[in-house]
Amino acid sequence: MRTISDLSLENLRLDVDEDGIATVTLNRPAKRNALDAATIDELIEVFATLPRAGVRACVLRGEGTHFSAGLDLVEHYHANRSASDFMHVCLRWHEAFNKMEYGGVPVIAALKGAVVGGGLELASAAHIRVADHSTYFGLPEGQRGLFTGGGATIRVADLIGKARMIDMMLSGRLYRGQEAVDVGLAQYLVDDSEAKAYEIARAAAQNPPLSNFAICSAISHMQNMSALDAAYAESVVAGVVNTQEAAKARLEAFAKGTAAKVKPQ
Ligand code: 1HE
């Protein structure tokens, strides 16, 4: 089993603090964190490793002023790929983003600047997206003569609906600010997206890992199932999670009236 210390990273940085909060940093600021093949390989390695490395939550951020400019267009241009080559590139992207979405570790994306094309595909594989006032979302594939290949047809369409996604791709429309939140591209709009992302990560890290595992994998899996199968799977997952040892002290506290109540502050 690979551990965090086995990882050798160049395009990403990985830090894990004493509370088990990981920070994954896209670290190609000079290229606006464009996603080249090497970065995707490193994302696969990192998100294959985090779930079994004791990590409680993860903040995904970009170095520099932009989260990510999407597919490395210059690499793609020079590689002169065949259709089959690019299909395999896309399969690697899917592997990376599926490991994020289905890995069971809460991933909170701290966004800023450009979150475009493949950068939006990456962000949409996170469980929570936090935007700041510099953040803007785009799918410039149409204007580049391209098509999404990193799961946007599934995840972005799921977030905002197919009509808005088609509009973004055809017309180059960008979303930002409150409108981006209103359409579903981000759940938070704040002055400091990283501070907020860490606040959320720390709150999530208080939950038992098995609860977080279910929240951050089962819901995504169940969305791919028929309602009948999802209801069955939900009952199996709840059977395991809701009887876990780690929940007992919390339930006891509630039964004794000493647990925090669920009320607005
Ligand atoms: C890049 C990339 C990139 C920047 N691939 N190198 N994505 C796009 O269509 C977005 C393309 N990028 C931009 O529109 C702009 O670069 C930004 C708005 C993101 C940033 O602008 P700015 O003024 O801060 O930076 P810049 O001067 O444009 O770029 C700085 C450097 O980053 C420059 O390299 P340099 O060597 O000349 O300094 C740029 O070439 C480089 N750079 N973006 C490669 N994307 C699985 S399919 C997914 C399909 C897609 O993702 S389509 C969307 C592609």
Image (spheres, rainbow, N blue to C red):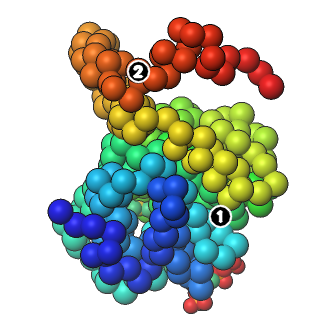
Amino acid type, callout 2? Lys
Give the CA separation, mark 1 to mark 2: 44 Å
Q: Position of residue 196 (x, y in %)?
A: 70, 50
Judge from the rendering whether residue 184 lies leftward or rightward of residue 101; answer left or right. right
Judge from the rendering whether residue 38 lies leftward or rightward of residue 236; answer left or right. right
For label 1, being within 8 Å of ligand 1 is answered yes
- For residue 174, say whether it is visible: no
Residue under the image location 33 percent in, 58 percent down: 53
Question: Which image quarter has ligand 1?
Answer: bottom right
Residue nearer the viewer, 154 or 251? 251
Residue nearer the viewer, 25 or 28? 25
Judge from the rendering whether residue 2 lies leftward or rightward of residue 167; answer left or right. left
Q: Which residue is mark 1?
A: 114
Q: Please state, as top left, top right, bottom left or bottom right, where the C terminus lies in the image.
A: top right
Q: Looking at the picture, does residue 119 appear above or below residue 249?
A: below
* Residue 189: quarter of image: top right
Q: Looking at the picture, does residue 4 appear above or below residue 22?
A: below
Residue nearer the viewer, 85 or 190? 190
